[in-house]
Structures are given as C-alpha cells and as structure tokens.
Image (spheres, rainbow, N blue to C red):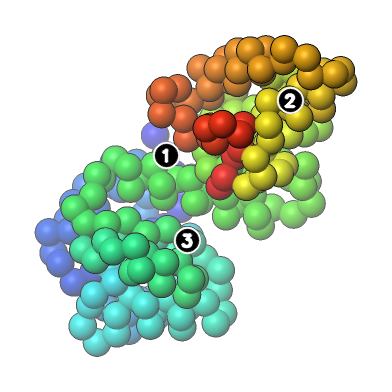
Amino acid sequence: MTAHGKTILLVDDEPEILELLRIYLRNEGFALLVAHNGKEALALLARERIDLIVMDVMMPEMDGMESCLRIRETSDIPIIFLSARGQELDKIHGLTIGADDYVTKPFSPLELVARIKSHLRRYGRHNAGPMNQDEIVVDNLVINGSTHVVTVDERQVKLTPREFAILELLARNRGIVFSMEHIYERIWKASAIDSNNTVMVHVRKIREKTEQNPRQPKYIQTVWGVGYKIEN
C-alpha cells in the first residue's frame, strides 16, 4: 500500500511515541519528517513540503497550541493533536484554535492512521477545485450528487434510489433532525400515513451497507422519539 508521496510531520518530544508512529506510518508508505518541539516544526514547515502534521500538545520550547496558532496564520494544512490531556475543555480549545482533530494518549496507532488518511482525503478534495463541488464528504463517507455514487473508505457501496435519496437528504442538511414522517414525505412524495416502519427499514439497510458496525452507527444518528440526522 502506498500513500502517493504524502509527507507527514511528526512533532513530539517522546522518543517512544515517535518510534511507534514511524513504524505504522512507514508501513503505510508515508514519508516522514520529525521535530521535537514547535520551533523545530515551524522551521521544517517553512522549507519542506508537508501534507499533514501530527503534533503533541505539551512540549518544551514551544507547545502544540502556540505552534498551531502560528501555522494557522499562513496555512490550512491538516493538524492532528496528540495529548495526554483528555478533558473536554482541552479538546474544545485545541479544535477552536485551528486543529482538525484531537487524539488522546494512549491511542490506537491503527485508528490514528485511519484518521490521517481521512484528513488527507478531505484536504485533497477541498483543494481540488470546482470539479468536486457536488460531493458531500462525511468523514470517510463520500456522496456524489451528480453520479449517485457513494463510497466508504474509497469502497463503492450500492444503494437503491430511495436509500441514496435519504442519505443525501440528511447529509446535505447536517445537524438537522428529520422526523420519519418528513423523510417519507420528501422522498416518497406522498402523505406520511403509517410511514415509520418504511423509513426505519430503509435507514437500517443504509447502515448495513455503509457502517462498519450498524448497531453503533457513525453516520446516520437516531434521535430517539424525533427522527434521524447526520451530525458531522
């Protein structure tokens, strides 16, 4: 497996963490650069082509938070924070100042690799120009409104026209909760009489096709007593 020439900058003052990341990321074909604090990271970023940064928060010389603020003055490169500080306020602060993701130590190397790939895909699409304007990206799920193609982790999944329509409706209106009656009326173009079971069956089938674990859905969320939404 190759990473198509992508370069990751690892910024951490813990040798054990750096070595662990080296093993997993090199195995995925990424090129790696290493810095031990924020100052070194900024110096490397100024002279090297870097596609994504994985950065510790607590470091000497210059910590991750200050480094992120400096980087965001000139660049929107994806930044993933690593930190032993897992309080909700810490995560919110990190994301507010410009980080794209916040991973708490100890972490799963495989999960971190998956997050890195996801952010690289998203960043690549964001900078690809107008050809991808009709694509909706929800984490690793990509919905193309023109071609009606849906992919998960770059694997195409086959949805029926109504399954696609439900998924697209929720994805285009992220954060909005749609009742089952509203979904039925929008998709079936008919009055929502005894419609709940029909919508539930279609949502279940969408989850079976798009989710790694349909019982713990990542994309379509159930809002109990109300309906469904896609949040992220």
Of the image marks 2 and 1, the number of the one nearer the N terminus: 1
* Residue at (72% x, 15% y) in the render: 195
Q: Which residue is mark 1?
A: 2
Q: The residue under label 2 is which amino acid type?
A: Glu
- Front residue (pair 127, 134): 134
Location of mark 2 (residue): 181
Q: Disc 1 or 3, which lies upstream in sequence?
A: 1
Measured Cα–Cα span from mark 2 to mark 1 = 46 Å
Say few, some or many: other residues with alpha carbon within 10 Å of mark 3 (under 14 / 14 to 19 / 20 or more): some
Q: Residue furthest bottom?
A: 61
Amino acid type, callout 3: Asp
Q: Which residue is at the far left?
A: 16
**Disc 2 versus disc 3: distance between alpha carbons?**
35 Å
Left or right: 2 in relation to 141: left
Q: Is residue 178 above or below residue 57?
A: above
Identify the residue position indicated by label 3 in the image.
100
Numbered disc 3: secondary structure: loop
* Residue at (73% x, 34% y) in the render: 169
Please, what is the three-letter code of the amino acid marked with disc 1? Thr
Mark 1 crowdedness (10 Å alpha carbons): few <14, some 14-19, many ≥20: few
Residue 89 visible in the current orientation: yes
Question: How far across and down, in percent of the image, does residue 200 sit?
Answer: 60, 17
Q: Which mark is residue 90?
A: none
Circle 2: element type:
helix
Left or right of 207 on screen, residue 176: right
